[in-house]
Amino acid sequence: MARNLITEVPGIRVGNAQDERLASGVTVAVFDETTTVSCAVLGGAPGTRETDLLQPEMIATGADAVVLSGGSAFGLDAATGVQSWLRANGRGFRFAGIRVPLVSQAIAFDLLNGGDKDWGVHPPYRELGWAAAEAAAESFALGSMGGGYGATTLDLKGGLGSASAVTPSGFRVGALAVVNAIASAVIGGGPHFWAGALEEGDEFGGLGLPARVTADMRRLAWKGQGREPPPGTTIALVATDARLDKAAARRLALAAGGGLHKALRFANAATDGDTIFAAATGRRDRPVDPPAQIEIGAAAGDCLARAVARGVYAATALPFPGALPAWRDRFGQNRSAR
Amino acid sequence: MARNLITEVPGIRVGNAQDERLASGVTVAVFDETTTVSCAVLGGAPGTRETDLLQPEMIATGADAVVLSGGSAFGLDAATGVQSWLRANGRGFRFAGIRVPLVSQAIAFDLLNGGDKDWGVHPPYRELGWAAAEAAAESFALGSMGGGYGATTLDLKGGLGSASAVTPSGFRVGALAVVNAIASAVIGGGPHFWAGALEEGDEFGGLGLPARVTADMRRLAWKGQGREPPPGTTIALVATDARLDKAAARRLALAAGGGLHKALRFANAATDGDTIFAAATGRRDRPVDPPAQIEIGAAAGDCLARAVARGVYAATALPFPGALPAWRDRFGQNRSAR
């Protein structure tokens, strides 16, 4: 728990790259070897790449990397940059004597955040993908970084979050999330996070929960309410060191998806693209019995909820007129000094 | 039926681009407007992009283009080139006041066909995708073209095929296929196509069927049999001018998938990536009752089977030592002149 990051699960490194003028970026989780990965596409407006091969009935073991990026559908060339980096480094799923790096990706919509999206002929995410892979390490920064650089929620700046845990059976679990949610991570626009009941220490401010949530505080609200809503999306990776097959990894993705509902009011909407990847590195080589599997799923959901809150908590506002404030701007201890 | 191409369905144009040294290429179907599209991923080793959004429960109407390319997973940046071309031409799914071109793609594995795959840092498919979109027209060439340039089957050169039909209810139907199948399109290595019973005129040679198919002629055989098989794949688009919703389009993709089994022995294997897209342009604005829907599905399956045979029939061999012969080399009227 030293880092409280998904990289507490051995075999995973995470890298960020972002472009301030573009107000967007790429986060990549690079696996030390081709790793069992599946996914669950839970929102109604997804943007994805190489997700079919992650389904349990498909033959590939999994993937070499998972990309979480901004850029909406334009961001999907980030996986090409990551793939090129992996190829240059001799990595990839091996078949028929050659190596093909398999890179799965989901994107978030950050095209209306004030950044300069006039990038010329081809989008810049391929180069950001390469840079993020090049930067992958066990330690990485949260908040307005990588795929979370340009992310927003309904009422506060979004960002990149992560968290980790150890289950009672001793399996390590972690989550990584780009929080660009269609709705809010805080209760009624106040300082308390919906995920408050799950907070470890003061990892997202230590404020706990409000004594009472009024009807007004829980009123449904979302981006663009009452007019055409710009898509929001939370895209995430959860991981464990347990040895799971792809079907169990898909089960893990579905179980972890519950974390979005603990951390956001609300998620998995018709116009969001919420997508959860789940990786099992298998580094802890002991059997996963049904109770252990249940614990891993529940822990992954909790980690994802905490990662969502931490992403918003760590974010900093974009430097544009009218940009959404960050949680720290509005509720942090230094807010009066700003 | 003048062209006997998928472009007999109004609202669809098709373009090819290929690189002879690479021995690979890209085919794109560009829709005149964002069009209802769904898909069915039927093989066990798919490589895909933007297929999740095509599922019936997702909110996007469909796509602006469908890409069928070579390059295995490296070819997935072809969609970026097509997307950039669409953006430069003001196209795209409109939301929140901006346009995002939605481009779905599947790839075929042609990395071991003798071409030079040492392309440097990033794969060349993005530029091929742009060129294919730029070339899109109602008329296009079949055989060793576009995504079918580097394609092979078990025993003969593969290629790009297409065919069209009109249903008894008057709906137009067409198919477009990159035939890189794991197995064979011809019976027992001879000149007859498995799809022979469905042939219109002499669209793939007019030889019909052999009087008797012996056990030896139907013996199972596939690429790499007995050793690690290189993935084969047939990727295809079927289309109709009927007005279908996405759920009906997915039903169409599934029905059309039967065409692969009429044209190949065999398909949908654990190591192929067979994927069928289905588009409904809705240009013929009359109700589609259940019988009409059944006819459209059956016609699409037949068109796909014919497109597979036509792709092999029209192909020319790659100019490399040891390259698989083309059907015309082995069985065509001019074979003695070669």
Image (cartoon, coloured by chain):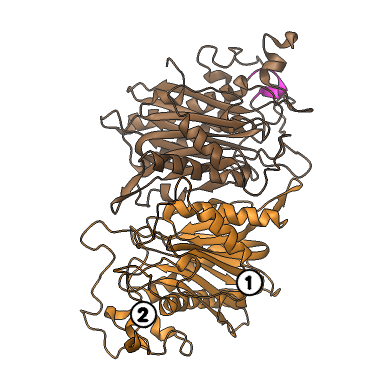
Chain colours: A orange, B brown
As displayed, is residue B65 above or below residue A162? above
As displayed, is residue B279 above or below residue A271? above
- Work out whether residue B157 or residue B260 is closer to the camera in this orientation and state it: B157
| Residue named by callout 1 | A137
Q: The N terminus of chain B is located in which quarter?
A: top left
Q: Is residue A116 visible?
A: yes
Q: Which mark is residue A294?
A: none
The boundaries of the magenta stretch are B186-192
The kind of residue tagged 1 is Ala
- Work out whether residue B235 or residue B295 is closer to the camera in this orientation and state it: B235
Q: Earlier in the sequence, mark 1 or mark 2?
A: 1
| Residue B81 rendering spot, x and y as whole percentages | 50, 42
| Residue A308 rendering spot, x and y as whole percentages | 43, 74
Q: Chain of mark 2?
A: A
Q: Is residue A248 visible?
A: no
| Residue named by callout 2 | A327
Query: In percent of the image, x 38 and y 31: which residue is there?
Result: B294
- Are both tags, 1 and 2, on one chain? yes
